[in-house]
Amino acid sequence: MENESMDGIRGSGQDVSLEVQEVGRKVAQCSHSAEEVLAGFHEIQMEDWQSPAGQAYRESVALQAVAVRRALDRILEASAAVAAHARAALTSECSPDGRC
C-alpha cells in the first residue's frame, strides 16, 4: 500500500490537475491581495503632505511599493507556472511516481 502523504499530490492526471488548479486559485488570491496593497500605497503617495515627516513617510511607502511590486511580479510568474503544470498534469499519461 502506497503512502498517500509521501512526496506531493497523488492520483490521476485529472485529480492532480484539479488539485494544482486549487493551488492556482490560492496564488491568484495572493496576487489580488498584493494588488490591493499597491492600490493603498498609491493612494498614500498621492496625498499632498507638506511636512518633512509626511514627505518621509510617503517616500518610505514608495520604497515599500517597489518591494510589493517585485513580489507581485514573482507571484504572477508563479501563477503562470502553476497553470502550466495543471494543464500538463491533465494531459499527462504518467503516474505521479513517474511511471509512464
Image (cartoon, rainbow, N blue to C red):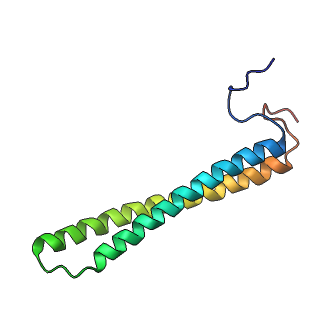
Q: Residue at x 17, y 74 (%)?
A: 55
Q: Residue furthest top?
A: 1
Decide: is 7 above or below 81.
above
**In the figure, is residue 18 to the left or right of 38?**
right
Q: Is residue 7 above or below residue 13?
A: above
Image coordinates for residue 50, horizontal then vertical, percent: 14, 80
Task: Report which quarter residue 60 is drawn in.
Answer: bottom left
Lateral position of residue 48 relative to residue 24, left or right: left
Q: Answer left or right for 49 relative to 29.
A: left
Q: How many marks?
A: 0
The quarter of the image holding the N terminus is top right
The residue sitting at 73% across, 21% down in the picture is: 3
For image coordinates 76% across by 34% down, the residue present is 10
> What residue is drawn where x is 82% and y is 49%?
90
x, y percent for residue 38? 41, 68
- Residue 34: horizontal and vertical position, in percent? 46, 61
Position of residue 58 relative to residue 80, above or below, is below
Q: Residue 80's spot in the image, x, y percent? A: 65, 59
